[in-house]
């Protein structure tokens, strides 16, 4: 099983409920187990700042899935929960990003791991440091 680290966020609807639902949906999958979870952090929006604050958290998961399969899982959970991609960095019912996967560097058209902006976003680094400080340090030191 591979280890991966995800960051979840939401800022419309009931963010705390949506985060819990996303965690439950991920953990219920036969090819994935949530092994660690951070507390929820309230953060200012990044990129597009004229919107509600975000609730963010990090997860460590063990998975049998490849990085591309894990991406499909994350997108599937988002879609099942009603996520609509209307604008870049806009409000989100749920967002699930792959931040790191076994410390691999993946540069494919639809998947960049580590996440390209992870090293400069506190809403990624703060909850990630809570559950995987070594991974957070790796993100910062390898700077994109």
Image: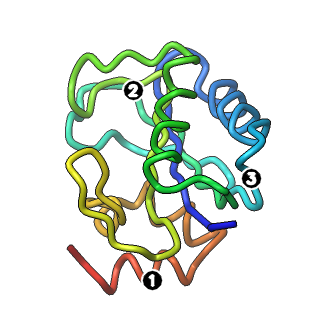
Where 86 sits versus 73, above or below? above
Q: Mark 2 or mark 1, which has the lower sequence index?
A: 2
Q: Which of 107 and 87 is in front in this view?
A: 107
Provide the residue designation for mark 3. 34
Here the colouring is rainbow
Quadrant that contains the N terminus: bottom right
Where 78 sits versus 110, above or below? above
Estimate the x, y position of residue 23 in percent, counting from the top left: 70, 39
Provide the residue designation for mark 1. 137
Residue 132, image quadrant:
bottom right
Q: Mark 3 or mark 1, which has the lower sequence index?
A: 3
Distance from label 3 to label 2 (Cα)?
28 Å
Distance from label 3 to label 1 (Cα)?
21 Å
- In the image, taking residue 82 as reference, residue 119 lies left or right, namely left
Camera-nearest label, 3 or 1:
3
- In the image, taking residue 111 as reference, residue 9 lies left or right, namely right
Camera-nearest label, 2 or 1:
1
Provide the residue designation for mark 2. 52
Helix, strand or loop at disc 1?
helix
């Amino acid at each position: 099983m591979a280890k991966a680290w995800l960051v979840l966020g939401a800022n419309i609807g009931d963010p705390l409920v949506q985060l819990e639902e996303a965690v439950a949906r991920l953990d219920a999958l036969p090819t994935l187990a949530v092994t660690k979870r951070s507390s929820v952090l309230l953060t200012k929006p990044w990129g597009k700042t004229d919107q509600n604050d975000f609730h963010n958290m990090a997860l460590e998961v063990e998975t049998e899935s490849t990085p591309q399969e894990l991406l499909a899982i994350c997108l599937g959970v988002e879609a099942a929960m009603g996520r609509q991609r209307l604008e870049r960095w806009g409000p989100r019912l749920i967002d699930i990003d792959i931040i790191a996967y076994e410390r691999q560097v993946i540069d494919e058209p639809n998947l960049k791991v580590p996440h390209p902006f992870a090293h400069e976003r506190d809403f990624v680094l703060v909850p990630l440091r809570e559950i995987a400080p070594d991974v957070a340090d790796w993100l910062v030191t390898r700077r994109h």
